[in-house]
């Protein structure tokens, strides 16, 4: 799943529209349809990758921003585990595709794959508690390396 604006980026849109579910963040009806598409994809056996931030902040990178609730609603509704993954280097390797001369550069992307959060663990938490829990899990490696203050 990814923001629908990606469909306007030349080259990237070719791959995106075949492999992803666009999320129209400014249209509640289309956003709801994306949620249904994702649930159907899960029922068909597909894995779904969601970046729950709903966007990348323009400053203070790699500070994370508060998560949107959609990923957690989807997980609880579909009764599937969550596998949190922290990306340690993406914030300085990628730039906005609109910035032709942006700071993007190739490099090694280090990730930290956390233990899965089971359906049972999720059911014991509200969506807000689950969101906070996942936020702290993902932020842990960033904090340990001094990349994130909070």
Image (spheres, helix red, strand yellow):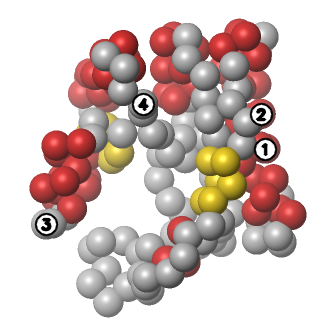
Q: Label 3's element?
A: loop
Give me the C-alpha separation between circle 1 and circle 4: 23 Å
Q: Locate the C terminus by quadrant.
A: bottom right
Q: Locate the N terminus by quadrant.
A: top left
Mark before the other along the chain sequence, 3 or 4: 3
Q: Position of residue 127 (x, y in %)?
A: 66, 20
Q: Are marks 3 and 1 in contact (CB under 8 Å)?
A: no
Relative depth, front residue between 30 and 95: 95
The residue identified by callout 1 is: 136
Mark before the other along the chain sequence, 3 or 1: 3
**Residue depicted at x 63% and y 59%:** 111
Mark before the other along the chain sequence, 1 or 4: 4
Q: Which mark is residue 25?
A: none
Q: Label 2's element?
A: helix
Give me the C-alpha separation between circle 4 and circle 2: 21 Å
Q: Which mark is residue 10?
A: 3
Q: Position of residue 77 (x, y in %)?
A: 51, 10
Mark before the other along the chain sequence, 4 or 2: 4
Q: Position of residue 116 (x, y in %)?
A: 68, 31
**Residue depicted at x 62% and y 47%:** 85
Q: Are marks 2 and 1 in contact (CB under 8 Å)?
A: yes
In this view of the protein, can residue 83 be seen by the observer?
yes
At label 3, counting other C-alpha atoms closer than 10 Å, the crowd grade (few under 14, some 14-19, many 20 or more) is few
The residue identified by callout 4 is: 47
Give me the C-alpha separation between circle 3 and circle 4: 26 Å
């Amino acid at each position: 799943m990814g923001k629908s604006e990606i469909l306007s980026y030349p080259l990237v849109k070719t791959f995106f529209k075949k492999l992803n579910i666009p999320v129209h963040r400014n249209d509640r009806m289309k956003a709801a349809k994306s949620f249904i598409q994702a649930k159907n994809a899960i029922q068909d056996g597909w894995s779904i990758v969601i970046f729950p931030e709903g966007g990348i902040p323009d400053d203070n990178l790699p500070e994370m921003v508060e998560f949107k609730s959609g990923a957690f609603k989807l997980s609880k509704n579909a009764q599937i585990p969550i596998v949190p993954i922290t990306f340690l280097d993406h914030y300085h390797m990628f730039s906005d595709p609109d910035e032709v001369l942006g700071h993007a550069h190739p490099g090694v992307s280090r990730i930290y794959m956390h233990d899965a959060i089971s359906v049972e663990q999720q059911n014991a938490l509200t969506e807000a508690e689950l969101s906070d829990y996942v936020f702290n899990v993902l932020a842990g490696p960033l904090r340990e390396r001094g990349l994130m203050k909070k």
